[in-house]
Image: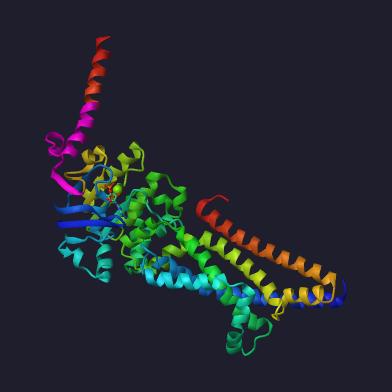
Amino acid sequence: MVNIQSLTKSYKTPKGDIPVLQDIHLQIEKGDIFGIIGFSGAGKSTLIRCLNRLEEPDSGTIEIGGRVITDLAEKELRQARQKIGMIFQQFHLLDAKTVYQNVAFPLEVAGHPRPYIHQRVREIVDLVQLGDKENTYPSQLSGGQKQRVGIARALVNSPDLLLSDEATSALDPQTTYSILELLKEINRQLKLTIVLITHELDVLQHVCNNMAVIENGRIVETGSVEKFFLHPESDTAKRFVHIIDYYRDKRHVMEGVGAGI
Amino acid sequence: MNADLVDLLREGLLETLYMVFWSSLFALLIGMVLGITLVVTEKGGLLESPKLSKVIGSIINGVRSLPFIILIVLLLPLSRLIVGTSLGPTAAIVSLSIGAAPFLARIIENSLKEVSAGKMEAAKSVGASPITIIFRVLIPEAMPALVRGVTIGIIGITEFTAVAGAIGAGGLGSLAIRFGYQRFREDVLIATVIIIILLVQVIQWSGDSIVKAIHKKRYKFE
Ligand SMILES: Nc1ncnc2c1ncn2[C@@H]1O[C@H](COP(=O)(O)OP(=O)(O)O)[C@@H](O)[C@H]1O
Ligand SMILES: [Mg+2]
């Protein structure tokens, strides 16, 4: 579904070019939920934003569903983007539009007829369980509800791929859980490929099948999520897994103490 | 108050309203085009073009650095060319529009800049074109700030109108000068001042009401 070859990207600053992505190779299967994990500043956002070219790569190729995204001219790129949904940490809903209008926007952009838009928005708003909020403005919604609108907007035009840039990082644990469940459900129902980036292990553990670890702009480890937890190889993976081990041990110790009393 | 005063004031007010209305409309149109262009062409904008941004920015700064009264004089030939005369309210509209447009452009630019880049990226990510983003995202999202800014702009134009009155544009400004200053008619002077103050209040109040209505709709609070 997604094939990334030799992708590089650097940011130009007055002090010179700062490499952010270096020689990235990555394959993501159709129907997978693929997690990219890394610490802050590792280059996760830059990588996922290259997939729909919100960020222009310096070199390398990105192929999505057989189409070489990196070769597309402006107009074709816009068409390709209609089939790549994206959700954001800060939701980025339009305050001037109601939930209905926010969700309808991608369909209007794609030029669908009004009756179809009407029916499709209903469908998708129901899918994200916001059927009673159609005429509400985003400012009146909770964080979790806002992200559901974000998901509805990303899915309404039946994309082949969903990109998620830390979509749950601004939410409390319980809401995070419900959003992750929703993503899983969507993946199952629609056979949708999902690429999500995160710095939270819970997210990786909860929804992803496969993963890649990114460290200083390089992919340092790929494989199944199980492998990540059982046989972490990279520094980053070890540090992440060490954190859970630390808390697990601590809990054992505390439970042990409790039992001893 | 005698009948002659009432007539004078009514005529002055009508001329002022006429000038404010048309100048605001034209200045708003030009200002909107310039303001949007500034925002979308700046570095990191939707249609990045630093050169164009710099050229427009410099022209705006140039026009804005001239005192308004000098600008009017400079634009007299243009008024004559466009409306056939350099005297009267219609001629003043030409100078007022061009004089106020850069001011409005800056106000509009600042209002549009309040829209977060993230919202425009979200629109980009669904495949929206720059034009669609400008009209469906940028402008609607900035609307409260735009209305607030344009209100300040129209009040500025009202003040400019009074200044233009001093050099033959007509309106309340011209009344105040011709009667109040040159003929020592204090009653005319005071009456025109009161009317201009009221006019500014009404404009401000209208702008505030629109902003309040937008907020009430979008945020369900004042
Ligand atoms: N527009 C930019 N200009 C310069 N440097 C940037 C820019 N955006 C991101 N960076 C740098 O690139 C690196 C990776 O950023 P990012 O992809 O946002 O990381 P992550 O999402 O993993 O936290 C960081 O060091 C960041 O400072
Ligand atoms: Mg990030």
Quick one: quadrant of the N terminus of chain B? bottom right
Where's residue A120, x and y in %?
Answer: 33, 60
Residue B54: say if magenta.
Answer: no
Q: Nearer the viewer, residue A149 or B40?
A: B40
A234 part of magenta stretch: yes
> Whole-percent x and y of residue A58?
21, 61
Where residue B3 appears, x then y in whole percent? Answer: 86, 76
Residue displayed at 45% across by 72% down: B56
Residue B82 is left or right of residue A240, and the answer is right
Q: Quadrant of residue B63?
A: bottom right
Residue at x 61%, y 62% (from the top left corner): B207
- Against A214, residue B9 (above or below) is below
Tell me residue A79's x, y (percent): 26, 67
Q: Please, which residue is most extreme toward the right here?
A: B2
Tally of marks: 0
Residue B212's quadrant in the figure? Answer: bottom right
Residue nearer the viewer, B39 or A145: B39
For the point 16% across and 48% down, the residue is A219
Between residue B150 and residue B54, name the one nearer to us.
B54
Main SS type for the magenta part?
helix
* Location of residue B86 with respect to A138 vertically, above or below: below
Query: Taking B75 as reference, is A160 left or right?
Result: left
Specify whether residue B128 is in view: yes
Instruction: Specify whether B180 is left or right of B168.
Output: right
* Colour mapping used in the image: rainbow
Up-down relation of residue A39 to residue A112 (above or below): above
Q: Residue at x 24, y 10 (%)?
A: A260
Q: Is residue B22 visible?
A: no
Report the residue that reaches farthest toward the front: A15
Q: Give the extent of the magenta segment.
A: A217-246
